[in-house]
Amino acid sequence: MTVTSSTTPLIAILTDFGAADGYTGVMKGVILGIAPGASLVDLTHEIPPQDVRAAAWVLHTAWHYFPQESIFLCVVDPGVGSERHPIALQAGGRTFVGPDNGLFSYVLAALTNPTDARAVLLENPRYFPAERSATFHGRDIFAPAAAWLAAGVALNDLGPSRPVESLVRLELPQPTWRGDTLVAHRVHTDHFGNILTDITGDLAQAVFAAPIVTLTLGGHAITARARTFAEGPPDALFLFRDSSGNVAIARRNGSALAALALSNAQLDEEPITLTGVVADHRE
């Protein structure tokens, strides 16, 4: 069954599939077989394999910039075929389709009122193939769900309601104070090796307003700050404010991650401490 709509919303696709195999292309074929007028946007297919936390962050930094009624098809699903639930979530004027494994944690955290969101389990057999792979729900469940939604099928038609408060949420890091020392955490490392911290909002402004700030990480004391990469020192790590608004660590024309000689897993165990930030900006 194919439905054609003159106002088909766009579908943005986020996966950890990479570009070597045909997984993403097959999902697009499924979508276009159901909703041939759908506009497809590749948000990214380079999420590190099985890294739900990285996927959640990338989605967090992107979805606000898409039009209202956009659909986000998100498949980073290390628990595929297990008891984890396939869901569709309407929140913030968009719809998110994917596994209930914490991928939508930042979307849920941004809700000012939980009653503004609705979720369903993707279980109505009318909209999914009778034969489904145990290892490729992106093709057999999530892509069809996104396509039917784009074609105008109502969210509630795809399956029974799921209480939004029951959805899986990752524990999202928050900076804390230890006396006059601000303790931060890595939230993401981007393609360029920039290391993003959980310092944002007023605290981020305070980091750049203070006369002297020292960030200590992995035996490195970082004091330089810059507004742009070009303004950063040529041979030293420095702090800047990423386009997400978060304080981040960079190396001009290089990789902060490589300069620190630490893996992301090691960074998650290393304390990131800042001194010199004015305590009046505590959140």
Image (cartoon, rainbow, N blue to C red):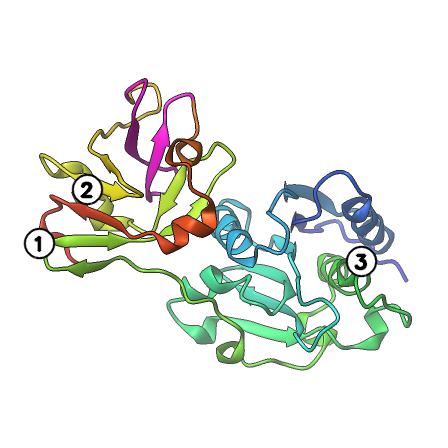
Residue occupying image coordinates x 38% and y 43%: 196
The residue at which mark 2 appears reads as: 207
Q: Position of residue 144 (x, y in %)?
A: 79, 61
**Nearest the camera: 58 or 107?**
58
Highlighted range, magenta: 233-253
The residue at which mark 1 appears reads as: 280
Q: Position of residue 93 (x, y in %)?
A: 52, 59
Against 202, residue 142 (above or below) is below
Task: Find out whether the residues at labels 1 and 3 contact each other: C-beta distance under 8 Å.
Answer: no
Mark 3 or 2, which is nearer the eye?
A: 2
Residue occupying image coordinates x 34% and y 19%: 230
Q: What number of labels is visible?
A: 3
- Give SS at disc 2: helix
Q: Position of residue 48 (x, y in %)?
A: 60, 47
Q: Picture quarter containing residue 112?
A: bottom left
Q: Position of residue 180 (x, y in %)?
A: 10, 54
The span from disc 1 to disc 3 (Cα, nearest Å) is 51 Å
